[in-house]
Amino acid sequence: MLERLQKFIAQAGVASRRDAEELIKAGRVTVNGKIVTELGTKVEPKRDKVAVDKKLIKAEKYLYILLYKPKGVITALEDPQGRKTVTNLVADIPERIYPVGRLDYNTEGLLIMTNDGDLTNALTHPRHEIAKTYLAKVHGYPPEEKLDKLRIGIKLEDGVTAPAKVNIVGIDQEKELTTLEIVIYEGKNRQIRRMCEAIGHPVKNLKRVKISFLTLEGLRRGQYRHLLPSEVEELKKVSKKKND
């Protein structure tokens, strides 16, 4: 199957797609011994010989990781401030893998990491409406009329949220906390926290427990596992269905 040259270079772990494009334009990439500078070039990964700076490369195999991100960990490949990142938690994996979407520093829970750019795009694009389920412990006892605002869609600084599914799953009267199960289908920055703040019940603790059909079952904080081939196929089907 033919694929774009910059995608092949990125999948080989040499550079990001954007940086790969710069390598191509700079004349540092050859295909079957010939310099290629055209970004539209396509190659056959199993047949063509691609080299960057005269060094032959090959595409890494696709990896799909399910990580239980703890609080106090950055969802990034590196951090200028020296804080722990999700990359540190998968340091024993030699391939370069990237987080699919984000969880903020103080949020824990399920995070997918992969080097499959197409699946990443499918899972993060808003129009694909991939369900993400959170447990949010909020201050106080939000009444149903306030929760209805989240179910309909609430106005934030960057626009109105899509309708969410919201249910009360627990109440701690001693600590004056309510646990909400919230399902959203988009990924605005700090969305759950901002939604709850908007109705006057800020979040104390936040945990993502599910993405589509995937859960944290069997994992402890900081642990990860490889997705089963059947799970990968199901993820691709889910994102494709939403796109059709």
Image (cartoon, helix red, strand yellow):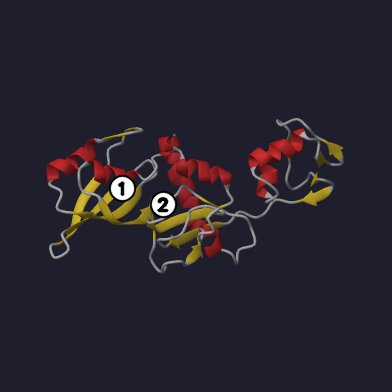
Q: Marks 1 and 2, how far apart in space? A: 10 Å
* Callout 2: SS: loop
**Count of numbered marks:** 2
Kindly identify the amino acid type of the residue bearing the numbered disc 1. Arg
Label 1: which residue? 193
The disc, 1 or 2, on the residue closer to the chain's N-terminal end is: 2
Label 2: which residue? 104
Residue at (23, 36) in percent of width and height: 152
Mark 1 nearby-residue class (10 Å; few <14, some 14–19, many ≥20): some
**Marks 2 and 1: in contact by CB < 8 Å?**
yes
Q: Position of residue 119 (x, y in %)?
A: 52, 45
| Image quarter of residue 92 | bottom right
Q: Nearer the viewer, residue 216 or 180?
A: 180
> Which quadrant would the N terminus be assigned to in this image?
top right
Q: Position of residue 191 (x, y in %)?
A: 34, 43
Q: Is residue 219 above or below residue 146?
A: below
Q: Position of residue 84 (x, y in %)?
A: 51, 61
Judged from this view, the residue extending furthest toward the front is: 81
Is residue 2 visible from the viewing direction of this image? Answer: no
Is residue 197 visible from the viewing direction of this image? Answer: yes
* Callout 1: SS: helix
Q: Is residue 235 left or right of residue 29?
A: left
Q: Nearer the viewer, residue 42 or 191?
A: 191
Q: Is residue 4 left or right of residue 137?
A: right
Residue at (27, 43) in percent of width and height: 195
Q: Is residue 149 above or below residue 172?
A: above
Residue at (14, 52) in percent of width and height: 141
Kindly identify the amino acid type of the residue bearing the numbered disc 2. Asp
Residue at (74, 51) in percent of width and height: 58
